[in-house]
């Protein structure tokens, strides 16, 4: 029998006496792990929290349902199937883990199918003796005739006599009530008085007959001993194994291939947990970062330019002058827009232009024009604000340095030209959007009236793509226009403390809170602070992964962690020394219910034999301290490789509205923006938190988004995800591997087959004997 090495089952050392939720972290992995275990402390030593790295993003659109579709509070079948499949995932027991692609139901079914009970010889003998005695025949005189009974049939006869007397008395009462009700249909008092009179005269005789039959039963049979005998016959030595196997016989339900092959019904507490997955906080305020908005607008324009090329390529295949003319107008509009934008940017320093443009938007939102300000004091404040912003933008550029010095005359000149240029630019941009929409309308009209009989089935897709790109451009245009005011609000924020600067108060309310979002009352707020120095510490926690698979930096390049840097890369390159990474999210614990699973049977494994070489679990009890003990470095690998069901998930940890705030070196702001953008496009994430790649109506508020400003980076991924599992370690497997000696012993213990054969043969001979 496979068994764990003694060195891996060491007694809990003094250092391990400290509860896991009270331990002090030494690296960023432990900071996250201990913060979660502290928020959801469990005193069960047989349970281990397993942090899923990275998390598994859930599509709440596929899991949620309309309350009107419920029947008696039961969720629709489709959502039940999908949630069952999620809750049936198996994860190897490890502080850092990931689902391994197997299902708990499959592992459990395989485990119990390989187990069998080792018969209790003494119980079998006792039951055999009782059965022999209960089959003893006795002769009784019934109605003057002698009849032969076994003890069981005689008991049944007496019991039937008693129950028949009770039934006769009950039936007589019903008949009299019906008779008296018919006699007094409209007078309840007369009816009830008549019934009481009859009852007083007749009840005693019937009750005496009932008691007489019961007394005869008590005289013939000592009921205490009789019931003990029957209880012994109903005693089992399999510890519930047979009942567990019966449950699994028909529990699997087939599915169409679109949903899978089959599933095992699995629910949770709370039952409606999928309804709580929708993010409760909105898209992070990207408007606070005008540079990010400008980059996003440039991207939207580039995509629209690509769309022009697509239309120019398909134009020869579309026999429509209207579509051709609209495509040409569309092409000219985007080139005109690009030229106007380029001319405006090349006249001035990019940083000066951006700073003045922001303040122009601020003034414009208040009904003023920046170049028309005449008040000397106001002009001085504007010069100071623009200069500070120019310096900030210059410092945040790659390899940043000091920005150019500006004065009011320069600001006024730039603002005037910017005002005139913007009017032209805005007009050309609107012309671009109008041209694109006209093209889409022309293409739709062509499809509706001229192309029905053609093979241009792909053309509607091009129309929808065009509309999508135009919509993105319009949204981004609005975002950029509003960015100035949000940025200005942060720059002029009043410090909470006289010694604080506005930069230090920036993003104070970035994290989600239940108070602001009452729909999250089931969720717990978790806030974690990670020192920059902890990013360079190697974790000593046991993991399910190999060392080279597990390395992860602040950013994870993809959901599978395929793009990695060393632990300290982000901290050393971008963070200010002595600062912290702040992580905040909403979390909730969901308990898993498996009515088909009876893990308590494994407490009786000493009474089982098994057919497989691998046992279910180690022969000694594994605890969370066993796995968390740094001395047991091989424990996770041994559990995964040498045992078939060493543990099973009993709860999952769901998180949503994940927000991270980092103090960064302002000179590296542009590099951080670029890196964050690449991570976002790859569908990665940060630390152990994944980014949603789900395209739904809410996808814009689910994907990772971030902005950098005032020496900080704030990033958010609102999508719900499973970030961890609580697993219960299986009871020690004390079953024995079946061999020839064990098989012989079991065969000798189960001797009823031969006895039944003898009995049936005797019954057959008796039936064939001639009647006398």
Image (cartoon, helix red, strand yellow):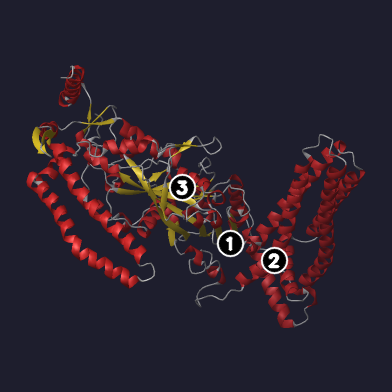
Ranked by sequence position, the earlier of labels 1 and 3 is: 1
Toward which corner of the image does residue 754 lie, by quadrant? top left
Residue linked to disc 3: 567
Mark 3 surroundings within 10 Å by alpha-carbon count, few (fewer than 14), some (14 through 19), many (20 or more): many
Residue 506: percent from left, percent from top: 56, 68
> Which residue is depicted at the point 12% across and 34% down?
147
> Which residue is depicted at the point 31% across and 71% down?
190
Residue linked to disc 1: 282
Q: Are marks 2 and 3 in contact (CB under 8 Å)?
A: no
272 left or right, relative to 209: right
514 vs 139, nearest the viewer: 139
Residue linked to disc 2: 482
Is residue 687 at all visible to an observer of this figure? no
Q: CA distance from mark 1 to mark 2?
A: 17 Å
535 left or right, relative to 747: right
Residue 700: percent from left, percent from top: 62, 54
Q: Nearer the viewer, mark 1 or mark 2?
A: 1
Q: CA distance from mark 1 to mark 3?
A: 31 Å
Ranked by sequence position, the earlier of labels 2 and 3 is: 2
Q: Nearer the viewer, mark 2 or mark 3?
A: 2
- Looking at the image, which residue sits at the far right? 321
> Which residue is depicted at the point 27% across and 43% down?
600
Which label sits on residue 511? none
294 vs 273, nearest the viewer: 273
Q: CA distance from mark 2 to mark 3?
A: 37 Å
Q: Are marks 1 and 3 in contact (CB under 8 Å)?
A: no
Mark 1 surroundings within 10 Å by alpha-carbon count, few (fewer than 14), some (14 through 19), many (20 or more): few
The answer to whether residue 639 is above or below residue 537 is above
Label 3: state its secondary structure.
loop
């Amino acid at each position: 029998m496979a068994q764990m090495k003694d060195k891996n089952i060491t007694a809990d050392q003094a250092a391990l006496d400290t509860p896991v939720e009270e331990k002090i972290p030494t690296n960023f992995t432990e900071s996250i792990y201990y913060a979660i275990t502290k928020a959801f402390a469990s005193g069960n030593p047989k349970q281990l929290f397993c942090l899923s790295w990275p998390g598994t993003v859930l599509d709440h659109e596929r899991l949620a349902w309309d309350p009107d579709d419920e029947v008696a509070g039961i969720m629709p079948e489709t959502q039940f199937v999908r949630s069952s499949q999620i809750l049936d995932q198996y994860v190897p027991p490890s502080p850092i883990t990931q689902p391994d692609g197997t299902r708990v139901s499959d592992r459990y079914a395989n485990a119990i199918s390989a187990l069998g009970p080792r018969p209790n010889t003494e119980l079998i003998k006792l039951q055999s003796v009782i059965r022999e005695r209960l089959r003893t025949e006795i002769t009784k005189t019934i109605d003057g005739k002698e009849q032969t009974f076994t003890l069981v049939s005689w008991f049944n006869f007496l019991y039937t006599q008693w129950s028949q007397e009770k039934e006769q008395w009950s039936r007589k009462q019903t008949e009299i009530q019906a008779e008296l009700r018919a006699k007094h249909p409209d007078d309840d008092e007369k009816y009830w008085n008549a019934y009481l009179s009859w009852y007083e005269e007749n009840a005693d005789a019937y009750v005496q007959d009932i008691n007489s039959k019961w007394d005869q039963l008590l005289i013939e049979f000592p009921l205490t001993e009789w019931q003990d005998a029957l209880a012994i016959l109903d005693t089992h030595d399999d510890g519930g194994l047979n009942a567990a196997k019966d449950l699994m016989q028909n529990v699997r339900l087939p599915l169409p291939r679109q949903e899978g092959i089959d599933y095992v019904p699995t629910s949770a507490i709370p039952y409606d947990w999928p309804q709580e997955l929708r993010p409760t906080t909105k898209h992070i305020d990207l408007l606070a970062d005008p540079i990010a908005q400008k980059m996003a607008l440039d991207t939207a324009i580039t995509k629209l330019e690509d769309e022009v090329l697509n239309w120019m390529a398909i134009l020869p295949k579309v026999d429509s002058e209207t579509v051709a003319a609209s495509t040409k107008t569309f092409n000219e509009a985007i080139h005109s827009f690009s030229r106007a934008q380029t001319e405006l940017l090349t006249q001035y320093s990019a940083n000066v232009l951006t700073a003045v443009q922001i303040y122009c938007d601020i003034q414009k939102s208040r009904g003023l024009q920046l170049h028309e300000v005449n008040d000397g004091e106001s002009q001085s404040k504007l010069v100071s604000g623009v200069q500070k912003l120019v310096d900030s933008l210059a410092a945040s550029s790659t390899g940043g340095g000091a920005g150019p010095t500006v004065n009011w005359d320069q600001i006024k000149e730039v603002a005037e030209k910017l005002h005139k240029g913007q009017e032209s630019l805005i007009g050309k941009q609107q012309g671009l959007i109008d041209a694109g929409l006209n093209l889409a309308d022309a293409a739709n009209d062509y499809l509706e009236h001229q192309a029905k009989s053609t093979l241009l089935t792909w053309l509607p897709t091009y129309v929808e793509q065009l509309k999508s790109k135009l919509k993105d451009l319009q949204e981004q245009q609005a975002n950029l226009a509003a960015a100035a005011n949000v940025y200005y609000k942060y720059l002029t924020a009043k410090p909470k403390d006289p010694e604080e600067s506005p930069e230090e108060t920036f993003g104070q309310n970035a994290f989600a809170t239940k108070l602001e979002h009452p729909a999250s009352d089931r969720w717990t707020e978790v806030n974690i602070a990670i020192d920059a120095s902890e990013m360079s510490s190697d974790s000593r926690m046991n993991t399910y992964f190999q060392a080279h698979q597990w390395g992860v930096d602040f950013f994870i390049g993809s959901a599978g962690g395929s793009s990695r840097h060393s632990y300290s890369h982000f901290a050393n390159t971008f963070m200010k020394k002595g600062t912290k990474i702040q992580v905040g999210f909403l979390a909730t614990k969901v308990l898993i219910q498996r009515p088909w699973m009876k893990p308590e049977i494994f407490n009786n494994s000493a009474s089982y034999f098994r057919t497989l070489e691998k046992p279910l679990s180690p022969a000694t009890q594994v605890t969370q301290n066993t796995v968390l003990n740094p001395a047991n470095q091989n424990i996770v690998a041994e559990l995964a490789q040498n045992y078939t069901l060493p543990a099973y998930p009993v709860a999952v940890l769901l998180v949503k509205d994940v927000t991270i705030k980092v103090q960064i070196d302002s000179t590296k702001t542009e590099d951080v923006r670029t890196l964050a953008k690449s991570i976002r496009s790859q569908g990665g994430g940060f630390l152990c938190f994944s980014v949603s790649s789900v395209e739904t109506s809410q996808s814009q508020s689910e994907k990772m988004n971030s902005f950098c400003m005032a020496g900080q980076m704030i990033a958010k991924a609102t999508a719900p995800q499973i970030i961890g599992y609580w697993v219960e370690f299986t009871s020690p497997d004390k079953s024995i591997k079946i061999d020839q000696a064990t098989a012989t012993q079991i065969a000798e213990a189960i001797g009823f087959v031969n006895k039944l054969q003898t009995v049936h043969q005797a019954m057959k001979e008796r039936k064939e004997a001639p009647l006398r």
